[in-house]
Image (cartoon, rainbow, N blue to C red):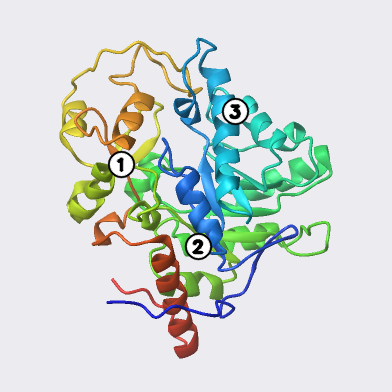
Amino acid sequence: MKLKTMSNRNVMPDLIIGDLHINPPIIQGGMGVLISGSHLASAVSNEGALGVIAAVGSGEVFPDTGTGYVNRSYQGLRQIIRETRKLTNKPIAVNIMCALANYETLVQAADEEKIDVIISGAGLPMHLPALIKNSVTKLIPIVSSGRAAAIICRNWQRKYHRLPDAFIIEGSSAGGHLGFSAAEITAGPMTLEEIVKAVLEATAEFKTVNGNAISVIAAGGIFTGADIAKFMQLGAAGVQMGTRFVCTHECDAAMNYKQAYLDCEKQDIIIIKSPVQMPLRVIRNTFVERMLSGERTPFKCTYHCLRTCDPEKSRYCIAQALLNASRGDLENGFVTCGANAHRIDRIVSVHELITELVLQYGQNVNCGDASSPE
C-alpha cells in the first residue's frame, strides 16, 4: 500500500536535546558492526529524525596501513562522520559503547569532529563529560533502570557540573546486547513502560541548564507509530528504533543481512550468551547452531575491542562474526535483531518508513487509542 506523503509532520512534538529540536522525535538506533553508517544515518537525519552512526567496527572502513586497530578506528570514525555530513546538514549522532576497549579514543574522534550527539551505553558512561572538550556535543547515556539514571545524574552534577541532555531507556525487547542478566530475562524484567516511569521519577528532581526536564527516550521493541504514541503519552519525549531501520534501502548492511530479517519467524529469534558474557538477541542460523553445539572457530584476536571479552575462552570472535554478517557472509556470522524483527515483511525507503510511523502516530493520538497491534 502506497502511503500518502505527510506534508506537515508537526503532528508530533519536538524531541528537545539541549538546543537541538528533533522532529519527528525518533532516534535511529546505532547498530554495529557497520549496519548504521553514513548512508542510513544521513537518510534518517534528512527526514528530521536523528540518524546515528555506530562507532564499533569503524576501523574496518579505513585501510589497514599497519597503524593498529585503535588508530584505524579513530581515523575510520572521523571519516564516517565526515562522509555523513556530506550527505546531510541536519544533526547526527554517534553511538559509542562503554564496553569498547578503545572507548576514550572513539569519544576523542567524535569530540574533535564536534558531533552533535554522543549516545553511550553497554555500561554506565560515568566519565564521559571529562572527555568532551567542545561546547556543542550533547550527551545521552543509555540505561535500563531509574537507579542507573539517578546515579549518572548525581555523579555528573557533582564532578562535572552538568547533566545528561537526555536518557535513552532500553527495555528487554531491544536488539543486540541487552542490559539485563539472563536470569532477569528468564524471570521477566520490568516492562519498558515500568522502566520509563521509573526513570521519569528518578530524574524529576534534576533540571537542565535551561530549566527543562531531562528528555526521556523509550527504546526496545517499539515498532509502530501507535507504540510511539503510547510511550509519549506516558511522558517519554521520543523513541529510539533500530530494528525497523535495518530493512530500509539506505541501511548500510548487505542485502543478505536484510533478507535474514525478512525470512525469520518469531521462533528464530533467540537469546544467546555472547563472548562478552552478556545476553545477545540474534536470528538463529547455521553459524549460531554451530556455536550452540559447542563448536569452536579458531581465531587470533586482532582487535582486543571489548573490555570483557576473553579470547582464550571464547569459541569465536564476535567482532569478526558481526563484520562477516554485515558484509553478507552469514555462514561465518550472525544477525542481531530486536524481538519484533519477524514482523518486518518488506524493504522500504527511510522516507516511507518515517512517513508511515508519523501517520500511525497521528491516527492513534487523534482517536485516543495508543495500543499497539499484535
* Residue 144 visible in the snapshot: no
Estimate the spatial distance between the alpha carbons at disc 2 and disc 1, rounded to whole Å: 36 Å
Task: Say what amino acid the circle numbered 2 marks.
Answer: Glu
Crowd tier of the residue under label 3, counting other residues whose Cα lies within 10 Å: few below 14, some 14–19, many 20 or above: many
Residue at 36 percent across and 47 percent down: it is: 185
Tag 1 or tag 2, which sits nearer the N-term?
2
Task: Say what amino acid the circle numbered 1 marks.
Answer: Ala
Q: Number of labelled discs?
A: 3
In the image, which is nearer the foreground, mark 1 or mark 3?
A: 1
Residue at 63 percent across and 62 percent down: it is: 200
- Mark 3 element type: helix
Q: Quadrant of the N terminus?
A: bottom left
In the image, which is nearer the foreground, mark 2 or mark 3?
A: 3
Q: Is residue 240 left or right of residue 315?
A: right
Residue 166 lies, in percent from the top left, at 66, 55
Residue at 40 percent across and 34 percent down: it is: 278
Q: Is residue 213 left or right of residue 79?
A: right
Taking the view exactly as shown, the residue that stands out farthest to the front is 86
Residue 296 lies, in percent from the top left, at 22, 17
Estimate the spatial distance between the alpha carbons at disc 2 and disc 3, rounded to whole Å: 30 Å
Estimate the spatial distance between the alpha carbons at disc 1 and disc 3, rounded to whole Å: 26 Å
Kindly identify which residue carries mark 3.
103
Residue 77 lies, in percent from the top left, at 56, 32
Kindly identify which residue carries mark 1.
254
In the image, which is nearer the foreground, mark 2 or mark 1?
A: 1
Q: Is residue 309 left or right of residue 106?
A: left
Kindly identify which residue carries mark 2.
194
Task: Say what amino acid the circle numbered 3 marks.
Answer: Tyr
Question: Residue 274's mark?
Answer: none
